[in-house]
Amino acid sequence: MAQNDSHSEYLAIAVDAAKKAGEIIRKGFYQTKNVEHKGQVDLVTETDKACEDLIFNHLKQKLPDHKFIGEETTAANGVTELTDEPTWIVDPLDGTTNFVHGFPFVCVSIGLTIAKVPTVGVVYNPIMNELFTAIRGKGAFLNGEPIKVSAQSELVKCLLATEAGTKRDKNTLDATTNKINSLLAKVRSIRMSGSCALNLCGIACGRLDLFYELGFGGPWDVAGGAVIVEEAGGVVFDPSGKGFDITSQRVAASNPHVKDAFIKALQE
């Protein structure tokens, strides 16, 4: 099978899995949630686990040779080593805190890496009915329509997204809020949507201009969104300005015009 055909087939399989998981999320969203704490503020629900099981079963049935890394299984088993094998990296429910509170920024994120390179990405928000998809080299789409990053070239006119993270110790909080404080003087405004994957998609479709996050959960937060940003003409990089490493728990994204100014602002 030609590479492009197989990538299209992988995307179709991932979209099916995301939509099935989305149904579970949509049902659960309007019902009483059973919540467990993973950490002080980090939550996990029955829906997270049910969605991950569904997605993995779907992918394994269709693509038995592929490897899998998922947030809940990995959290349980501690295996996150990424190899060159085709590997599905799944966040069954990104934005669990939003889900628990009934705030509609929740999504399924499914990414496929081949030789460690993000190659297929699907991010689906079943509450707002937005399906973001991309295949490396084939462009990025929202509900089947092509999307592209914003053309904004001035930092002061940029909308910036970031997240507060899940740690609440004083040092982390001070570092986080000091950085936000310094950036607020340089950009138009700041948003915290509560979903790393949807922030990346916001960059891809131009509703956000800048995004960075330090210390998020793991590669499952970014594996789907990274391809979508790049295929929409955006750039994904380390907040230090170095190259993006999918396993580093550090990410920044923007359009190419504001990248250098953004990196400079992040360092100040």
Image: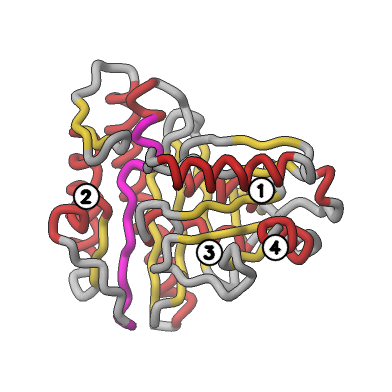
> Mark 2 — residue?
72
The residue type indicated by label 1 comes to Cys
Answer left or right for 261 relative to 7: right
* Vertical order, 49 against 73 (above or below): above
Q: CA distance from mark 4 to mark 1?
A: 21 Å
Labels 1, 2: front one? 2
Badge 2 amino acid: Glu
Q: Which residues are magenta?
A: 84-97
Q: Quadrant of the N terminus?
A: bottom left
Q: Are marks 2 and 4 in contact (CB under 8 Å)?
A: no
Which of the two discs, 3 and 4, sits closer to the camera? 4
Query: How many angstroms separate mark 1 from mark 2 (CA)?
Result: 28 Å
| Residue 174 location (% of width, % of height) | 52, 42
Kindly report the distance in space between the C-alpha atoms of the residues bearing marks 2 and 3. Answer: 22 Å
Q: Which residue is mark 1?
A: 205
Of marks 3 and 4, which one's residue comes earlier in the chain?
3
Looking at the image, tell me whether mark 1 or mark 2 is earlier in sequence order: 2
Label 3: few (<14), some (14–19) or many (≥20) C-alpha neighbours in 10 Å: many
Which residue is under mark 4? 263
| Residue underneath mark 3 | 227
Q: Is residue 138 magenta?
A: no
Alpha carbon separation for disc pair 2 and 4: 32 Å
Q: Residue at x 47, y 72 (%)?
A: 245
